[in-house]
Amino acid sequence: MSSTASAGVSLASVAPVDITGAVDSFTDAFLTRNRVATTTLAGRTTMRVGGACTLVTLDARDDLGELMDRPRRWLGKGANLLVGDDGVAEPVVVLGRDFTALEIGDIRGGRATVRAGAAVDLAKLIAACVAAGLAGPEGLAGVPATVGGALRMNAGTSTCWTLDWVRRVEVVLPGDTAPRWLERSELPAAYRTSGLPKGTLFVGCELELAADDPGKLKATATRLKQAKAASQPLALPSAGCVFKNPSPELPAGKLIDQLGLKGERVGGAQVSPVHANFIVNDQGARCADVAALIRRIRRRAWDERGVVLTMEVETWGCPDDLHAHPREVSA
Ligand code: EPU
C-alpha cells in the first residue's frame, strides 16, 4: 500500500507487465478448442482504458481445469472495471460457447425455473423473463453486465440486487478445479458482493421466479431504463458508479456533488456533470487520469466530511492506494 502516491503520478507502483510467451503456455489441445489472443483491455471495458493482456475465450467447459491451476482473471462485460495503463500479466478469461445457455422453464403453480450460463448478457436474460411473464429480473433493466458479472458483483439498483431471485449458483471456488452448485442461502451476499472469495468463477445460475403480467413487467423495465437515461451519463464511456454508497442516506453521488466536484477534470477524465458518482472518459483518458480523480474525490470526502469512500469499481493493475485509507493518499 503506497502512502506517497500523489495525483497525476504515473503508475510506477504497478509492476511491469510481461505477456510474451503467454500463448505458448497453453497445451495444443486447449488452443484447438479455445481462442487465445493478445489484445488491449481498453477495447474490452466500458471505461475504455487499460493496457495489454492475453485474452482467452474459453469455449469448451471441459478445459476449465487447465485454467484453474494457473493465475488468471475472469472478465464479463467489463462494465465495472478499471484497468491500469500497463495492462495485466495474467491471462484474462471470458466465457464463450459452452456458457451461453438460457432455458426458461414452463410455469407450474404460478412459478418457473430459469437457468442461465454466466456468458449470457444480462439484458437478454431480462428480456426473456419479461416475455415469458416471469417477475424479478426486470428490476435490473439497464444494468450493463453478463450474468456471471452480475452474480459476482450482486449488481443491482437502489431497489433490488441480482441475487434476490437466485435459487442456486454454479461456481468454481479458488483452489477447486471443477464447478459445484451452491444454494443461495450458502452465499454471504450483501450490497454489491456475492460474498464468495476473490477469484471465484461464476459458471451459471438457476432462478426461481413468480409468474406475472408481461405487459406490466415490460412497463417496469422501460421506466427503469428511462430513469437511468435521465440521471446517468450513458452516452459516454464510464464504469458506472465508481464508489459504493456509504449508506442509503448518503449516496456517494450526492456527497461528491455537495463537495462541488462535478465537472472536475484530470486529463481525459471528468467527474460527470450529470451524476457525480460517474467518472466519464470523454477525451481519451488514461487510467492515470481516472486514478488521480479518484484520489482527489476520496481525499476531499475524508477531509471535509470524514467519509471513507470505497471503490465499487473493480481495479486491475492499478495503484494500490486507490484502496488505501484516504488520509494516506495525497491528492
Ligand atoms: N444525487 C445528487 N447528485 C448527483 C447524483 C445523485 O444529488 O450528482 C442524488 C440524487 O438526487 C438522489 C441520490 O443522490 O437523491 C441517489 O442518486 P441516484 O438515484 O442516482 O442513485 P445512486 O444511489 O447514485 C444507485 C446505484 C446505481 C443505480 C441507481 C439506480 C450505487 C453505488 N449506485 O445509484 O448503480 O443505477 O441506484 O437504481 O449503489 C452502478 O452500480 O454502477 C450504478 C450506477
Image (cartoon, rainbow, N blue to C red):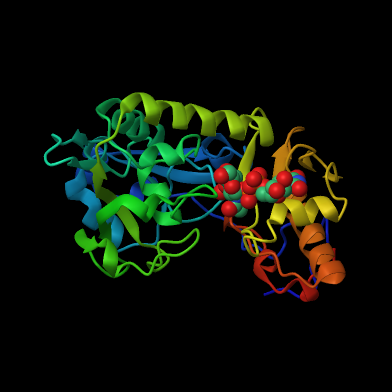
Residue 225 x/y as whole percent: 54, 31
| Residue that appears at 38% across and 31% down | 217
Q: Is residue 233 above or below residue 187?
A: above
Regarding residue 292, the answer to whether it shows in the image is no
The image quadrant where one finds the C terminus is bottom right
Of residue 183 and residue 54, the one placed in the foreground of this image is: 183
Of residue 320 and residue 66, the one placed in the foreground of this image is: 320
Of residue 89 and residue 140, the one placed in the foreground of this image is: 140
| Residue that appears at 45% across and 31% down | 221
Residue 105 x/y as whole percent: 15, 36
Does residue 75 appear left or right of residue 233 in this picture? left
Residue 108 x/y as whole percent: 11, 39
Does residue 243 appear left or right of residue 284 in this picture? left
Residue 155 x/y as whole percent: 47, 50
The image quadrant where one finds the N terminus is bottom right
Count of marks overlaid on the render: 0
Does residue 80 appear left or right of residue 286 in this picture? left
Regarding residue 258, the answer to whether it shows in the image is yes
Quarter residue 65 falls in = bottom left
